[in-house]
Image (cartoon, grey):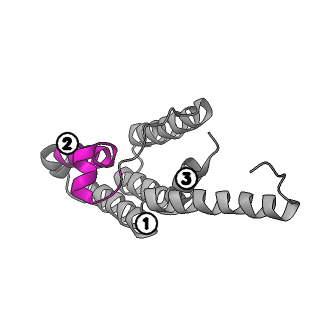
Amino acid sequence: MGTTPTPEEARRALQDVDRRRDQTAAAAGWPWWAWLVTGVAAVAYGFAADQYSDFVRTYGTTIVILLLLAAMLPNNRWGSALLKRPVRPRTTPDTSVLLWSVLVVVLLIGGTAVAGALDVPHVWVWSGLIVGVLLAAAGPWWQRRVLTRPA
């Protein structure tokens, strides 16, 4: 207890801390296939909205509300128990992360609005495709980055 660790012992201890942080992040995060399924669902939503004009009017709001509820499930005890996953800790978001997230959302919504105003054909398909690919490709990276960032 009162002795100074050797450089090798200190290196092993730091490696163990890094390994345990990665294990914790992997346990708290969603698997890659969940991000892929979410991306495919976004593409399917865009395709259905484009091909069936009444789809958004009849089912669109219901689907969006259900997806928002599903996104909130892991953040409370009842939802986490239902999903058999640990409750995610409430963290204060970094302001740069928040600003980047807002910027991406504004760009997606703004780009879709501009494309719709210019009568670009199949705006819903393109929007769903962009969001779906973004979720499937960048979702696991973003999740890992958020879960392993330093406090």
Q: Which mark is residue 16?
A: none
The mark nearer the N terminus, 2 or 3, is 2
Q: Residue at x 79, y 48 (%)?
A: 2
Tell me the SS state at disc 3: helix
The answer to if 83 sits in the magenta stretch is yes
Residue at numbered disc 3: 142
Q: Residue at x 87, y 60 (%)?
A: 7
Residue at numbered disc 2: 61
Tell me the SS state at disc 1: loop
Cα distance, mark 2 to mark 3? 27 Å
- Place of residue 25 in the rendered image (x, y in percent of width and height, measured from the top left): 52, 57
Q: Are marks 1 and 3 in contact (CB under 8 Å)?
A: no
Q: Residues within 10 Å of mark 2 (few under 14, many from 20)?
A: few
Q: Nearer the viewer, mark 1 or mark 3?
A: 1
Q: Which residues are magenta?
A: 61-86
Residue at numbered disc 1: 31
Q: Residue furthest bottom?
A: 33
Tell me the SS state at disc 2: helix
Q: Nearer the viewer, mark 2 or mark 3?
A: 3
